[in-house]
Image (tube, rainbow, N blue to C red):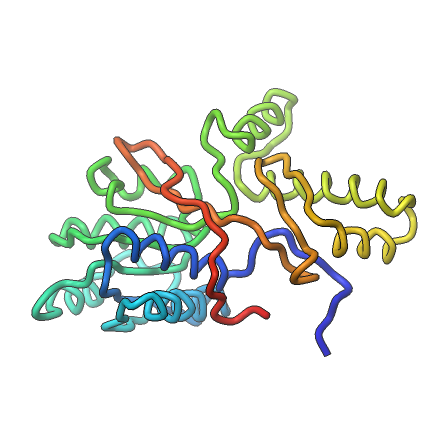
């Protein structure tokens, strides 16, 4: 039986992976290598596989699957395998893991002469990524899916700046997700006419057409019940600065129902 007694504001990992696959394909990539790891549960083990499913649904092809461990600082064995792929190097390499690992992989792979895309998930979304990758030129080959754009000037960026000015210790996209969820709860309580009956508030969340987000845009739980229908931003880099390369609700969902 499918549980309906909860909601989650972040889109499921397979949804984000599908959005990343779509943008990667739109950028001209037709072949990809995926990195998987059992160290981070389904996030590191399954998200790359879901990227591959979505990428192949679009017409691309996953030509190699490589393993890695969280905490790796030397990717020489995997990079050697990639750089020996014939007759042509892959157009994209996908990994879902943590910083600094993903930044180290991107830096070492590009330093070895790889000139394709290094793409990934929300694990890339950390301010330290830029310094870890190491150069603006290398960063221009990097893209990742995340929950929202938090650059200065964006609604989420402004929220983080205001919180810091007020003395709160905030620094990441997850702080903004918390703020968005509080905004949804307040609006749902108003719709339900109660602040005490949790099931009525939950029903209001799951039946309301859409909620305006403090971080920009809207979200709706009406179709899926427990997880949101929302746009997935893909972040790219130009001259070392982040920008939104695309923002879409993917049409193909590999796993979540």
Q: Quadrant of the C terminus?
A: bottom right
The quarter of the displayed image where residue 200 is located:
bottom right
Task: Name the foreground residue: 136 vs 61.
Answer: 61
Q: How many marks?
A: 0
Residue drawn 74% across the image and 61% down it:
6
**Residue 246: image location, x then y, percent:** 39, 44
**Residue 111: image location, x then y, percent:** 15, 49
The quarter of the displayed image where residue 52 is located:
bottom left
Task: Reply above or below: 169 against 144.
Answer: above
The quarter of the displayed image where residue 139 is located:
top left
Task: Name the foreground residue: 245 vs 49.
Answer: 245
Residue closest to the far left: 87
Q: Quadrant of the N terminus?
A: bottom right
**Residue 5: image location, x then y, percent:** 77, 64
Task: Reply above or below: 118 against 189.
Answer: below
State left or right for residue 73 relative to residue 15: left
State left or right for residue 129 relative to residue 29: right
Residue closest to the far bottom: 1
State left or right for residue 91 relative to residue 188: left
**Residue 33: image location, x then y, percent:** 26, 66
Residue drawn 64% across the image and 24% down it:
167
Residue drawn 30% across the image and 57% down it:
25
């Amino acid at each position: 039986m499918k549980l309906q007694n909860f909601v989650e504001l972040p889109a499921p990992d397979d949804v984000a992976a599908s959005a990343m696959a779509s943008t990667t394909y739109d950028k001209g990539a037709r072949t990809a290598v995926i990195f998987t790891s059992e160290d981070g549960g389904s996030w590191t083990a399954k998200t790359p596989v879901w990227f591959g499913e979505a990428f192949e649904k679009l017409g691309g092809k996953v030509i190699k699957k490589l393993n890695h461990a969280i905490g790796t600082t030397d990717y020489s064995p995997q990079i050697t395998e990639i750089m020996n792929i014939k007759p042509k190097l892959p157009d994209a390499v996908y990994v879902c893991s943590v910083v600094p690992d993903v930044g180290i992989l991107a830096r070492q792979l590009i330093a070895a002469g790889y000139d394709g895309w290094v793409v990934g998930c929300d694990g890339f979304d950390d301010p330290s990524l830029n310094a870890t990758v190491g150069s603006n030129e290398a960063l221009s080959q990097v893209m990742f899916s995340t929950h929202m754009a938090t650059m200065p000037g964006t609604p989420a960026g402004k929220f983080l700046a205001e919180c810091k000015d007020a003395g709160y210790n905030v620094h990441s996209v997850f702080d903004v997700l918390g703020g968005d969820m509080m905004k949804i709860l307040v609006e749902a309580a108003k719709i339900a006419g109660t602040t005490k009956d949790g099931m009525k508030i939950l029903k209001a969340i799951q039946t309301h057409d859409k909620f305006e987000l403090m971080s920009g845009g809207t979200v709706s739980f009406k179709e899926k019940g427990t997880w949101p229908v929302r746009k997935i931003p893909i972040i790219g880099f130009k001259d070392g600065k982040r920008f939104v390369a695309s923002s879409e609700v993917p049409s193909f969902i590999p796993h979540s129902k």
